[in-house]
Amino acid sequence: MVKIILLGVPLSTNHIYKSHCRFGHPSVYMTAEGKALKESYGWQAKSQFKEKPITGDVSLDVRIYRAKKIGDIDNYNKILFDSLTGIVWEDDKQINELHIKKLTDKKNPRIEIELLK
């Protein structure tokens, strides 16, 4: 079993992606805050996971510790899984089993990920 702990306030998809319409064409983009968080998660994961990215199916047990009790449980996945792609696994489409639990920790918000092989 491998455990990775990502420190910092977990942000939901609503805080990471924004959309706008230009010349009649809608567009979605990642905010600067989202890019910084994705980069931070990537560096934190690299410092803890020293192996080559996993190539087969991946099962995860994820615990999201938020400072406040807000946000849908499924709004945290996108940034988390994308930031670990190429570091922990080759592609997030390899995730075939996922268990997520939301918890509250005002003093130490974080995300704890256990890879179950």
Image: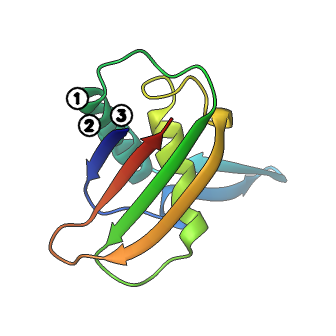
Residue at the spot of label 3: 42
Residue under label 2, please give it.
44
Residue 79's label in the rendered image is none
Amino acid tagged 1: Ser
Q: Horizontal and vertical percent for residue 76?
A: 51, 60
Residue at x-position 53% and y-position 39%: 82
Residue 9: which quarter of the image? bottom left
> Marks 2 and 1: CB-CB under 8 Å?
yes
User: Where does label 1 land, which residue?
Assistant: 47
The image's colouring method is rainbow
Is the Cβ of the residue at disc 2 closer than 8 Å to that at disc 3?
yes
Please, what secondary structure does the residue beneath circle 3 have?
helix
In this rendering, the label closer to the viewer, 3 or 1 = 1
Q: Residue furthest left?
A: 107
Residue 84: x percent and y percent? 45, 35
Q: Is 30 positioned to the left or the right of 43 in the image?
A: right
